[in-house]
Amino acid sequence: MRFIDEAIVTVKAGDGGNGIVSFRREKYVPKGGPDGGDGGKGGDVYVVCDDNTNTLVDYRFTRRYDAKRGENGGAKNCSGRGADDIYLSVPIGTTVVDTETGEVLADLTKKGQTAMIAKGGDGGQGNTHFKTSTNQAPRRATPGFPGELKVLKFELKVVADVGLIGLPNAGKSTFIRQVSAAKPKVANYPFTTLVPNLGVVDVGKHRSFVMADIPGLIEGASEGAGLGIRFLKHVARTRRLLHLVDVQPIDGSDPVANAQVIFNELEKFSPELSKLPQILILNKIDQVPAEELNQLCTHIVAELGWTGMVFRTSTLTGEGVDAVVWHLMNEIEQEREMEETDPDFAESQRLRFERLEAEVRANTEEQKEAYRAKRKAEREGRALDDDDFDDDDYDDDDGVEVVYAP
């Protein structure tokens, strides 16, 4: 199954049924009066959070969803039947954005969470509503109101407590395989991981957190290089980041320069994102001779000017991994407890994530537009430089114009 994390969908809520003009007709009851019923309400459109789906691939094939209209009113003051609502299942972590206004209509982060995204129209009124002492036989009824029509963007961001970031082949997939039941592909070439992978890290009884393995970033990712920013947005929902650095890169590159690339790309893509708490993981220490390890790790930390938490690990052998997991669990539990007991802290966290979401969304759209413009310019440039293009084809000097029309 393809991992689809964005989709454009058109939804149309049902129109309301029409009210009708009708009069009571019964034997021996002259001038029975108006009895036109109201129209039924049109169906609403909802999104519902479903933990059995993990991609938006279905919405790449079916792009429009229409709810049914309400039935028209009937005689004898019978109201028309309301139409059934329709529910669109989306994965946990889906945000629904109105493409016209940019308004976030729903942010679904819990199983079973439901939100209305298009309201059905109310039914029209039958002529019973218009009778008065001076107009006892009204011949007026109103049509149903139209349902809302919206073009929406579904954005999926994985919901995780911890995000793994780093250059390709830094050991991110091996790390998540060590600490969870997730089994992402592992190989000795870059970009083995092409989609985010989620794993639940079980630390003990009723103690766990979710970790996300984000595909590797490279220099220029914030401008579209490699996998670009397509998956960088997925770290926007995380509480903290684990930055894995290969202390002995197989290509002979400098670990300090490699780590700095990730710092720079985060800052370029989203300054707010770069402020998330980060933990530096010096990985693959099994590749370094024991007598050189301490000096190398000290050098990397000093050159980076890093003052935060640092761990040394070997995801291949598992050395040092447990210490990282226990540290993360304690930090996350403290943060969760503060959110429950301190309303001010909880509000500050909510506002921070809202700012982060808004910044990431704006930057993602900006980069996409720039990428589309670049591709368009490249295509137009190739068309102008094409060897098959001949100005003589459009030369009118001979009185004949030849145009190729496929």
Image: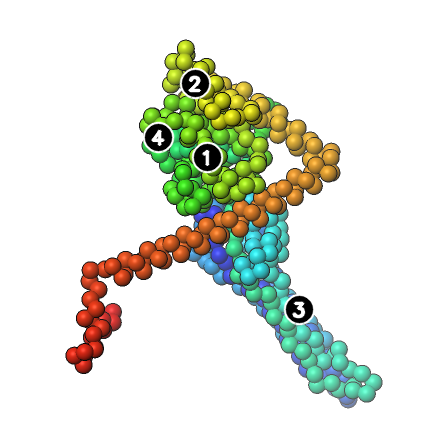
Tag 4 residue: 187
Counting residues from the start of the chain, the first of labels 3 and 2 encountered is 3
Q: Looking at the image, can residue 181 be seen?
A: no
Which numbered disc covers residue 296?
2
Mark 2 Cα-neighbour bin, 10 Å: few <14, some 14–19, many ≥20: some
Tag 1 residue: 262
Tag 3 residue: 122
Quarter of the image for residue 404 reads bottom left
Q: Is residue 394 above or below residue 226?
A: below
Which residue is at 60% across, 61% downward?
118
Q: Quadrant of the C terminus?
A: bottom left
Q: In the image, what residue type sits under mark 3?
A: Asp
Which residue is at 66% across, 28% downward?
334
Q: Nearer the viewer, residue 61 or 125?
A: 61
Residue 199, how many percent across, how many down? Answer: 50, 33
Counting residues from the start of the chain, the first of labels 4 and 3 encountered is 3
Q: Nearer the viewer, residue 148 or 242?
A: 242
Q: Nearer the viewer, residue 359 or 385?
A: 385
Q: Secondary structure at mark 2?
A: helix
Q: Which marked residue is nearer to the observer: mark 1 or mark 4?
A: 1
